Amino acid sequence: MLTVDMSIPDSVAAALGLVFLVGFVPLLPTEPVLISCGVLAASGKLPLQWVVITAITSCVLADLVNYGIGRRLGHPAIAKFAQRRTPALVLEWIKDRLTRNAEPILIAGRWLPGGGTIGAVLCGSLRFPLRRFAMASTIGCTLWCLYATLLGYLGGELADDDIPLALGISLGIAAVLSLPASMFLRTQRRRALAAEAAVALDIDDDPDLEPVAG
């Protein structure tokens, strides 16, 4: 009688568990973990398709949970993002464009620091339609997880099973590809500072706001 062994090696199960954890918990280093798993998949140590499926599943579930948090708590749920400079810039960028191009903005926002989490909480707080959000989340998570995992796989293929070299190649490429996002955030920061300076100048020049001598 022919039997098929459907068991999963402990090392593979542990790796997939780690992938699920970093994809589900906000602000954990998802990209480096997925790149590393892609490298290991290229050397045959991990099943590439299960790494990708696990990552997509955990990211979509995290988005739905964060959407629910935003929907339940409303404005206080997004207030904490406005307290830190980079998340505040990402928040304002997504919020300003959400009404015009919601799905493309939510997808593109995943390449910004914390963009997936911020977008999900924001959509929940604004009562954005769940069906539209879930569709954008699924597409965005799929593209982003494929990007990170296949980047590691490419490094593994180029390095010919030299895992440290493969990681170096993949992380180096990721750093280069992240430059547009960094440049965008610097531009947003300069615009925000310029706007604040303009407001301060208008206040200084308004005679109605001059202090009255006692």
Image (cartoon, rainbow, N blue to C red):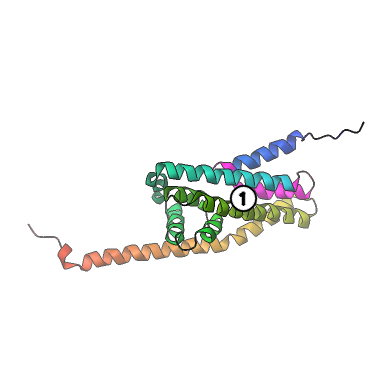
Q: Furthest residue to the top?
A: 1
- Quadrant for the C terminus, please: bottom left
At horizontal 62% and vertical 50% (from top left) the residue drawn is 31
**Can residue 29 be seen in this snapshot?**
no
Q: Furthest residue to the right?
A: 1
Q: Who is closer to the viewer here, 65 or 212?
A: 65
At horizontal 53% and vertical 44% (from top left) the residue drawn is 64
**Can residue 11 be seen in this snapshot?**
yes
Q: Is residue 57 magenta?
A: no
Q: Residue 112 vs residue 10: left or right? A: left
Residue 85 drawn above or below residue 64: below
Q: Residue 47 vs residue 147: left or right? A: right
Q: Which residues are magenta?
A: 24-48
How dense is the environment of label 1, judged by Cα within 10 Å: few (below 14), some, or many (20 and up)? many
- Amino acid beneath label 1: Glu
Q: Quadrant of residue 2?
A: top right
Q: Who is closer to the viewer here, 47 or 133?
A: 133
At horizontal 38% and vertical 44% (from top left) the residue drawn is 76
- Quadrant for the N terminus, please: top right
How many numbered marks, from 0 up?
1
Residue at image mark 1:
31
Residue 145 spot, x, y in % from top left:
64, 51
Residue 201 spot, x, y in % from top left:
27, 67
Q: Residue 204 vs residue 12: left or right? A: left
SS at mark 1 in the image? helix
Residue 29 spot, x, y in % from top left:
58, 46
- Overall secondary structure of the magenta stretch? helix
Residue 127 spot, x, y in % from top left:
43, 49
At horizontal 85% and vertical 35% (from top left) the residue drawn is 4
